[in-house]
Image (tube, grey):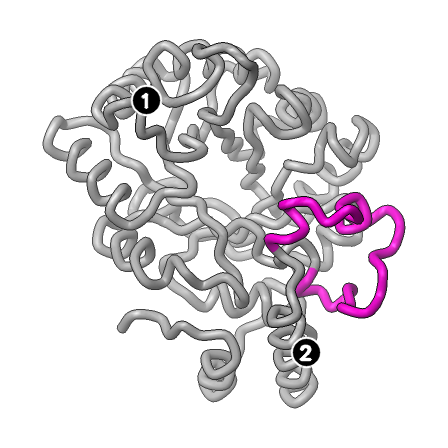
Amino acid sequence: MEYRNLGQSGLQVSSVGLGCNNFGMLMNQQQTNSVVASALDEGITLFDTADIYGGKGKSETQLGKALGKGRNRAIIATKFGNPMGDGPYETGASRHHIMRSVEASLMRLGTDYIDLYQIHKPDPATPIEETLRAMDDLVREGKVRYIGCSNFTGWELVEAQWTSKSCGRSCFVSAQNRYSLLSRDIEQDLIPAAEKYGVGILPFFPLESGLLTGKYKLDQAPKKGTRWHAWKDRGPMADAFWSQDRFKQVDALQTLCDQYEHTLLELAFGWLLNSSCVSSVIAGATKPAQVRGNVKAAGFSPEADEMVEIDKITGPHRPG
């Protein structure tokens, strides 16, 4: 396992992180225990969850129980900000909500500190100064070690970093956004901003919910037990991944993989980790075998001429 610094911070994380959004949703406690144990055995240290995952904290609860005495081997990253209820105080990034959310997450995780506390999405109703002051207070209190953001645009990250630096507060060390061979929008604004401010990128959906594993075909119904089978009614989540153009790109990438004699899974991980601004790739898993497969794939590195061919297929090109 390779370990990288999270942005310009001194915190090192495994190059492959475990996404815990399936805990409590597709996985019970026993299944979670098995996957977490496998991840620790493979050298994975970064476990990424959120208060909303699994349905109102179930993912955090199952992760905390699964880690147990192995807590000191793990870097726990969780998030706040998405609605946890119907009331006005159950969502957002206000000081009021942050202080309530962190206490609830600490209790569910069974720990007295969170390694990386992330705002799940921008909150236009709350001044960023208020959010950052509250998060900085949590760092000073020792309840949080580092702070990060998720789903921010480039300008939103710049505003947050400038605000923190000008006020002498803790800065975001990470930015977690959707990023993969097929979803490269953040190359246009977020990545340049992250590189300028020394913020580590944590890609989520690196496998496009399984599309980049090659196990789904446009003309075939998803197999029972898969996430896409659960989306069989083609709700908004399925529509975010399933399109004819994306399948065409996957077919072209598979042909490229065959030419260079490696797997599509290896390309998905290796391409992301080829970027110096990527600190860790967050990938979910429901079985220990998937964990092992992800870790093995992360050891692959594409050749320079293959990178050129990838840009021709998926674009846009990376800045610089």
Kindly identify which numbered label has been placed on residue 135: 1
How many labels, in total?
Answer: 2
Residue 264 at x, y = what percent? 67, 72
Q: Locate the C terminus by quadrant.
A: bottom left
Instruction: Report the front residue among 11 and 88.
Output: 88
Task: Judge depth for marks 1 and 2 and give the one in front.
Answer: 2
- Please name the predominant secondary structure of the magenta segment in the image: loop
- Name the residue type under label 2: Asp
Quarter assignment of residue 294: bottom right
Magenta residue check for 15: no
Residue at image location 14% in from the left, 27% down from the top? 168
- Name the residue type under label 1: Met
Kindly identify which numbered label has been placed on residue 54: none
Quarter assignment of residue 146: top left
Separation of disc 1 and disc 2 at Cα?
44 Å
Q: Locate the N terminus by quadrant.
A: bottom right
Tell which circle, 1 or 2, labels the residue nearer the N-terminal end.
1
Q: Which residue is mark 2?
A: 251
Residue at image location 37% in from the left, 49% down from the top? 200
Residues rendered magenta in the picture: 211-240
Residue at image location 87% in from the left, 55% down from the top? 223
Magenta residue check for 226: yes
Residue 260 at x, y = what percent? 63, 87
Q: Is residue 4 visible?
A: yes
The crowd level at tag 1 (other Cα within 10 Å; few <14, some 14-19, many 20+) is many
On screen, 191 above or below 274? above
Secondary structure of the residue carrying numbered label 1: helix
On screen, 55 above or below 40? above
The crowd level at tag 2 (other Cα within 10 Å; few <14, some 14-19, many 20+) is some
